[in-house]
Structures are given as structure tokens and as C-alpha cells.
Amino acid sequence: MTQVLENTTTAATALRCKECGERYPIAANHVCEECFGPLEVEYDFSGLDPVSLKAQIEAGPKNLWRYAPLLPAKPYDRSVQGVGFTPLQRAYNLGAELGLDELYVKNDALNPTHSFKDRVVAIATAKAIEFGFDTIACASTGNLAGAVAAAGTRAGLKTYVFVPSNIEPGKILQASIYGATIVPVDGTYDDVNRLASQVADEFGWAFVNINMRPFYSEGSRTLAYETAEQLGWRLPDHVVIPIASGSLYTKITKGFEELIKIGLVKDQTLPAISGAQAQGCNPVAAAFAEHSKEIIPVKQPTTIAHSLAIGSPADGFYSLKIAQQTGGTIEQVTDEEIVDAVQLLARTEGIFTEPAGGVTLATLRKLARQGKIGRDEVTVLYITGNGLKTQSAFDGLIPVPAAITPKLGVFEKWLGQN
Ligand SMILES: *Cc1c(COP(=O)(O)O)cnc(C)c1O
Ligand SMILES: [Zn+2]
């Protein structure tokens, strides 16, 4: 049986309603009983001295647990290894193409199951184990399924992943091979999520992004911590982040805010936080464009960026507010722009991302062209998933030459024609 490593502590003190402020004990609970608002983990960071905390972090493991004093869960022994501390790659070639002198790519496709979801799953699984659950589950647009499957089976938990049946076959294969039980559902992600919420209530399982959501979402803050640490404990000027439910987007922001509050970065202000959506599933970008506070759900998402296809985003409203308050923009891009951006990133930086990464880069390119990001601004592009899982999205789009016979003369002739 997997075990929590008890010699560590956490600064989490309560769950607190984001709307009315009501506090609840730390438990597998995500909705306020008073106002149905979402619950968020609250911490007491007052005892943390930034100088010694920084030293402790720098001496820590090269994975997300180096930030354990800032996390709501304790590490456990049968966890998937190597989650987090992914490279922040200086994007010389891409920057030159876009006219940005200080562009970085945070390549989170390099996590163990090839998406940033390993971070949120690490925290949610650790907490589920601490709470004594024997079954872990999720409603997924694809990548979460793989991350939960790997973490759940390795920890010896019963593992169920619910996915829309139309997602990429590579993602279904991945989740299956870890030995999780796949539940393909005929419907949109929102349909899957509704079913999963009922299952969570009925069966008492730990759904990482439903009843465990307050802990799950906190894992994304580590992306902000790493970015700052890798920049030499500085904050970037502008960041571009993909939005599905808006959890990643809001929690990277929260991470930056905490770095300022705790004093891990000095004399710094929040970056402009920009968000990226596909035109075929654009509820937050559409509200941003119309200066509206209301998110109108997209009933039938139609985009190759399946991992971002959440028509009714739980954190959409909070994402809108952040973009407006930080001077960021939330843009939308077409499937054509997505495919083009995937190829651009591959050819300039040697990173093959899935369509979600294409959404993020196409958005960055738009902002750069519109002059919304200055040439000398330190800018970070968050790449959240790997293209090898989504080969079906590029079927027929990338031509491969026909085979040749293994003869030098044939090759020489072929070279003249290619
Ligand atoms: C899940 C996911 C996101 C963002 O999801 P949020 O629900 O907004 O946190 C971004 N990129 C990829 C590849 C994902 O799988
Ligand atoms: Zn409330």
C-alpha cells in the first residue's frame, strides 16, 4: 500500500469559498454550502522566511516537490517520478520570427505522461491517499486521463477515467496501457463531467478534478514558481497560457501573486497574463472580446484542440477578470492557425506540441503582431502537451516522401527532385 511521507508539513489551513469567504476544514469538498461558490485552499505563509525558503527550494529535488512548503499535500512513496521542473527554453529562433528578443518556452510536454496534467494529478493523488480513498477517477479531455491512469495504477488505487469518445485514439490508448478502466462517453466534455459528478456523489470516489479539485488545481501554481526560479527569481513581463476550464490560467496567476507576497521575488509586479482558446471552443475569448462578464457556454465544441474543448469552463469568469486586471488579452485562433503554429514551433524550437500548444503559440503570434507584446518584454509561452499523442490531428497534413530503393544513384536522382 502506498504511503504518505509523514515527515513533511504543509501550510494549508482550510478550504475557503472564493465567493463568500466561508471556511471549511480540509476535506474532499469543492462547493460552498452557503453560496455554491468554488472552494480554494487557504494557507498560512506568515511563518515562511523568503531567504531560507529559497535556499530550501534550491536544495530540493528536481521535481515539483521542491516547492513542498507551498503545496497543500505531502509527497507519497509510490508516486510517478519526475513530475515538474521542466525546461524553460530560451526561444532564439521562434523569438526572431516573432520579433521578440526575450522569448522563453516552458516545455511542460516533458512531464512523465507528456502533459502538464502530471502536476495537478500529483497533488490530487497525494491528497486522495492521505484521505484514505481506494479509488481515483477523473473526467478528462484526454491528457488528464493519461496522468490519472499512470498515477492511480502506480499507487495501487482502482482507477477510472471518463472521456468523450471522440478524443484522439492516442490518448485513449495511453490511458488504457497503464491499466486504468476507460469509460468512453458519447457526448461532449460537459456531458462527461456531469456524469462524473453524479458518479462522484454516488460512489464516493476521489475525482481529481471534481471533489478533489481544490487540491488538483493548486498543482498548477508550480508552473509559476518554476518559471520565476528559472529566470533567476524574477517574474516575466508577459505570459501566454491555454484555457480549457481556466484552472491552469488562474493558478499560474495565483502562483505569481504568492511569489510577490512571500517575498521570493523582489520589486516585481504581476506579468500581463494572456489566455489562448480555439475559435471552435471560445467561451472565454468571446466574452473578453465583447467586454462582457458573462461566459456563454459553447454547446458543441468543434476544434482539433480537443484538450481545450470545454464549453462551460468552471474558472472562465475568474480568467476573464485576471486578463482585464493584468493587462492581458484572451484571443481565439482557427484550426488552420493551430496547425500552422504547431509546425512553426517544431521547426524553430525542436518541440512537437499537440494542438493545444498550437493554440497558445498562434495566440502569442497574434499578440506580437498586434504590438500587444513589446520586443524587449520577457515573455513566456506555456506548452502543455506533446504532439505524439495527437498524431490523428495532423493526418494527411504533413507530407512524407515515398520510399526509395537503397541505391546511391537512386538517392542522387531523388535529391535533385526534392
Ligand atoms: C488540460 C489542459 C490545459 C488546460 O486546462 P485547464 O482546464 O484550463 O486547466 C491546457 N493544455 C493541455 C494540453 C491540457 O491537457
Ligand atoms: Zn460561498
Image (tube, rainbow, N blue to C red):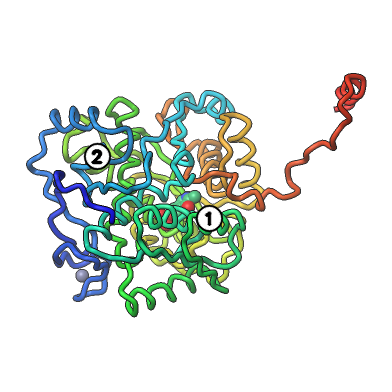
**In the rendered image, is residue 292 in sight?**
yes
Asked if residue 230 lies left or right of residue 331, the reply is left
Label 2 Cα crowd, 10 Å radius (few <14 / some 14-19 / many 20+):
many
In the rendered view of the protein, which quadrant contains the C terminus?
top right
Identify the image quadrant of residue 169.
bottom right
* Residue indicated by mark 2: 67
* Residue indicated by mark 1: 177
Residue kind at label 2, given as amino acid type: Tyr
Asked if 219 appears above or below 98 in the picture, the reply is below
Q: Residue at x 46, y 64 (%)?
A: 161
Residue occupying the far front of the picture:
1
Q: Residue at x 24, y 68 (%)?
A: 29
Residue kind at label 1, given as amino acid type: Ile
Identify the image quadrant of residue 108.
top left
**In the rendered image, is residue 289 in sight?**
no
Q: Position of residue 103 (x, y in %)?
A: 46, 29
Please tell me which residue lies in front, 149 or 221: 149
Q: Position of residue 33 (x, y in %)?
A: 20, 75
Q: Position of residue 405 (x, y in %)?
A: 89, 30
Please tell me which residue lies in front, 31 or 337: 31
| Label 1 CB sits under 8 Å from any ligand 1 atom | no
Q: For mark 1, give the secondary structure.
A: helix
Checking the image for residue 316, the label placed there is none
Asked if residue 141 lies left or right of residue 251, the reply is right
Identify the image quadrant of residue 258.
top left
Asked if residue 386 lies left or right of residue 40, the reply is right
Asked if residue 60 lies left or right of residue 147, the reply is left
